[in-house]
Every structure is written in C-alpha cells, then in structure tokens.
Image (spheres, rainbow, N blue to C red):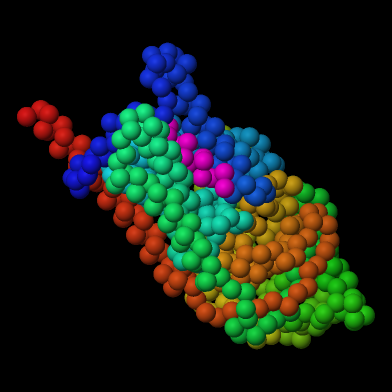
Amino acid sequence: MTVTATSVDESDQLEPLSGPATRGSRLARLVPAAVAALSGVLLYVSFPPRTLWWLALPAFAVFGWVLRGRGWKAGLGLGYLFGLGFLLPLLVWTGVEVGSGPWLALVAVEAVFVALVGAGITVVSKLPGWPVWAAAVWIAGEAARARVPFHGFPWGKIAFGQADGVFLPLAAVGGTPVLGFAVALCGFGLYELVRLAVHARRTRVVRRSAAAVALLSVAVPVVGALAARTLVSDKAEAGTVTVAVIQGNVPRSGLEFNAQRRAVLDYHARETLRLAAEVKAGKVARPDIVLWPENSSDVDPFANADARAVIDRAAKAIGAPVSVGGVVEKDGKLLNEQILWDPEKGPVDTYDKRQIQPFGEYLPLRSLLGAINKNWTSMVRQDFSRGSEPGVFDMDGAKVGLVTCYEAAFDWAVRSEVTDGAQLISVPSNNATFDRSEMTYQQLAMSRVRAVEHSRTVTVPVTSGVSAIIMPDGRITQRTGMFVADSLVQKVPLRSSRTPATQLGILPEIALVLVAAGGLGWAIGSGVRGRRAREA
C-alpha cells in the first residue's frame, strides 16, 4: 500500500503492541506512565561512568512505543515522566553539597523541555516515516535546552552518553546534534521494526514502504557511523608536543575547599616541583608545556606577591610554560581566568571563561533566592563576569585552546577555539565541589566526544580528578584517580585540519530543527484538514 505525501501514515490504524483487553482497567492506564519513567531511567543507565551506551536504543524504542498514536496532552505528561526518569538520577550530583532543593528545581525545569518533546513526538508520530521526524524533534528539544534559560544547560545531551559507542564517529560529521539524532533515530526505528513485525504476524500484511523506512532508520545511522570512521585519526599533522597535566589535589572535597585556597595552590606547585625532580633525574620526559586545572590558584597572583612567587618557582623548576587556573579581579570584575605563565617572563597571556555557570559562578534571581534561602546567596557572594574572546595560548609553538570546565558542554565554546587555530584542546576543571559523584565521568565523556568532533587531542587537568589525556580518536591513554596528587606526561599529536563538524558549526543543528518544524507543520496541517473534511 502506498502512502501519499499529504496523508498521515496509514499504519496509524495498526494496533499497538499492548493488547486491548485491559485498556479499561485503571492499572492499564497507569502502565504507560510507569513505562515512560522507566525508559527514562534506562536512558540514564546508558550514560557514564557505565559503558552501556547501547541501552539508549531500547530506551528510545520504548519511549516511541509509549508515545506513538497518542494525543499531544498525553505526550506532554509522558514526556515529563520520561524526563524525570532520565534527569533525576543523571543530575543528582548537583545537590551533593547544596541539598536536594536546587537539584529537584533544576530537574523540574529541564524536564519541561522533554515534556514538550514528548508532545511533539505524538504529533509527528502519525506521519509517514515518523522515526525521522521524532528524532529531529528530540534534537530540537536539546537545542532549546542548550540555550534557555540562563544561557542554557546542555548536560544530558544524548551525544554525551556515546563516548564508547559505535555512533561516536558521527560527531566528526555534524557534532553532537548529528550524533544524538542518529541514536534517537535508530531507537525509534527499532521500535517501528518490531511494531510492523508484530502487525505482519497478526494480519499477514506487510506494508513495504513503512518497513523500508523502519529498516533504513536503523541501518543508516549504523552504516553512516562506520563510514565516518575515516574522519577519525590520531596522526600528527603539525608535529607533536610533550604535555604535562598536573593534578595537585585539594585538602578536602565539597564547597569548603575554597577556604583552603592557598593550600590548593601549594599542592599544585608541589606536584609540579615533584615532576621537575623526576625530569631532572631522567625518570620522566621533559614536558614542553604544563597544564594546571581550573581554580589551581584562587589566590590572585596579580594582586598577591606571595602567590606569584609560588607559581614562578614552579614554572622555573619545570622549565616550561604553564597554564594556571586563577580567580582574579580586574577593574572591579571577578574573572575565572586561565593565565599563561612563562618561566622567565611570568604571566604573558590570559583567557577569561565565557560560559559561566548559573547558580555556581553567578546567581540569577538573587533577590528572590535570598528571600527563599539566604544560604544559597551566601554561597555565591559575588558574581563572576564573562569573558568575550576565545582563548588560544601559544605554548612553546603549540596552539592550545582553553575550554574551562562547564564550557565543554557547549558546542560553540569548543568549536570557537578550534576555528581560532587551536591544535590541541585543554579542559581545565575543578570537580572537587561534587565529591566522588558521576559528574566527573559525565564531563570526561564530553571531552572524549569533543576530541572526535574536532579531531584534536584533549587534555583534562582537574584539581581532584579524574585528569586525563585523550587522543583525537576519543581514546583515553592516561588518567588519574580521584582525590590524589598526580601528574600525566605524554607526547601527543598536534592537528590542524578541520572536520566537517568544525566547518559546518551550527548548520546541522539548524537543519534538524527545520526538519522538526516541517514535520510538526505537516502533521498539524493534516490534522486541521482532516477535521474540516469530517465537519463538511
């Protein structure tokens, strides 16, 4: 049977996988809600630190089963439950030190975006080839969540759960939107294949066009990912550089680690001096560049001569330029800054973090939050200011792009460093606030995706771990433990070519959002015309 371009999918008339016998019971009415929430949990389980990336496929398949053929209002509620099942456990680390209130509030807001996606999927689920439209709607939801409110919160993008998966090379094709689209499409296509197979067994009728679309929805992402492996390489294009990643550790985890700011600086200087001694003894290769993490010197070295002397001593001992993470105040502005420290000249360049963290580095709605709980406002006494320019340090001839911690979650923040000439990316971070939670591993997976997306070595110096060195193909070659002092030294490739994802930038995301809008417009228009025809 052929489906015309203006009709809804005739397979809407097929029975769902659930039997009709129990539809009238209250228990049966609760089943979709429970399944939606549990499929969200299944999606969470696919994320790091677990390597069960493939669970994202059945998670989307079950989500598609729950939503397909329902009204948009039901989709709104089921989507919200799916969002809660996914985001509640994924983001539990946000409440490690500040309590459950902010964590629950964040999840409640972020799940609204998933609810809207659920409603959108129910609308397009009546169209021919609905898995394509549904996957595009999911990416449109991610695009919105990455931008609003408060400049967005892209944590939990599907792409960030695929660092160990077969689909990872697609990051080099079109970035996180294309990678996430492929996963969602494959999941929805998997459900459609099962649904059509069950229908064919019941009725002995096979709709070739629908079956072809379902099969392609599963096959194209997999074949595309295998073909994209040709874009993934760890060969040096602009020489190599020996990099040292310093993890000095902190006196204690949690928010109070900042009370020991001088101790954190001393720890990182001490680890650098220890490494310098090993280099002098011939035990370790001499590094060309040294990378310290975010907040490794929260004592402003521009205003504090003692802090400056500590960093100077460490830089001279190791005999290489050092990127130092500092908190500095300039012209009344508080800045989260990376400082390029030359062993002879001292500070010669800076990069100010551009994507600062709401409720962590600045406090939106300060007066309202203060009225609710004064402890929240006391945690962020002064707001950080945003930087405005990309940060690419020239370190011993190597162009090192700086992406400070939270910025790694934002597509534009990473890409801007590569388009500005970065041959290597460093993601200096401070995860001590979040103790031993999964946050560290979720963020590490982001850096692995970014390595493949832009075909760059990525280093991850972290105050308390996990620090790592990641090859351009996404492999972690060295990593530290958590809450230990350690250092990593390795010769890594410098690369200058640009992947299609780097060249295209935001265009793939725009294209997928337009696909979603087109599908929604088609479905809504078809519904309106159908109602008018029935009324006539």
In this view, the residue farthest toward the top is 25
* Residue drawn at the location 47% of the way across and 16% of the way down: 27
Q: Position of residue 311 (x, y in %)?
A: 79, 73
Location of residue 331 with respect to 223 vertically, above or below: below
Q: Position of residue 125 (x, y in %)?
A: 33, 39
Residue 358 is inside the magenta segment: no
Residue 510 placement: quadrant = bottom left
* Residue drawn at the location 47% of the way across and 36% of the way down: 62
Q: 346 or 10, which is in the foreground?
A: 10
Check the picture and name the quadrant holding the N terminus.
top left
Location of residue 399 with respect to 210 vertically, above or below: below
Q: 437 or 231, which is in the foreground?
A: 231
- Which region is colored magenta? 54-66
Q: Position of residue 169 (x, y in %)?
A: 53, 63
* Drawn side of residue 434 relative to residue 418, left or right: right
* Residue drawn at the location 84% of the way across and 61% of the way down: 485
* Residue drawn at the location 45% of the way across and 56% of the way down: 221
Main SS, magenta region, reads: helix
In this view, the residue farthest toward the right is 281
* Drawn side of residue 2 relative to residue 466, left or right: left
Q: Position of residue 428 (x, y in %)?
A: 67, 64
Count of labels in the image: 0
* Drawn side of residue 166 relative to residue 475, left or right: left
| Residue 371 seen anywhere in this rendered image of the structure | no
| Residue 345 seen anywhere in this rendered image of the structure | yes
* Drawn side of residue 59 relative to residue 138, left or right: right
Residue 56 placement: quadrant = top right
In this view, the residue farthest toward the front is 204
Check the picture and name the quadrant holding the C terminus.
top left
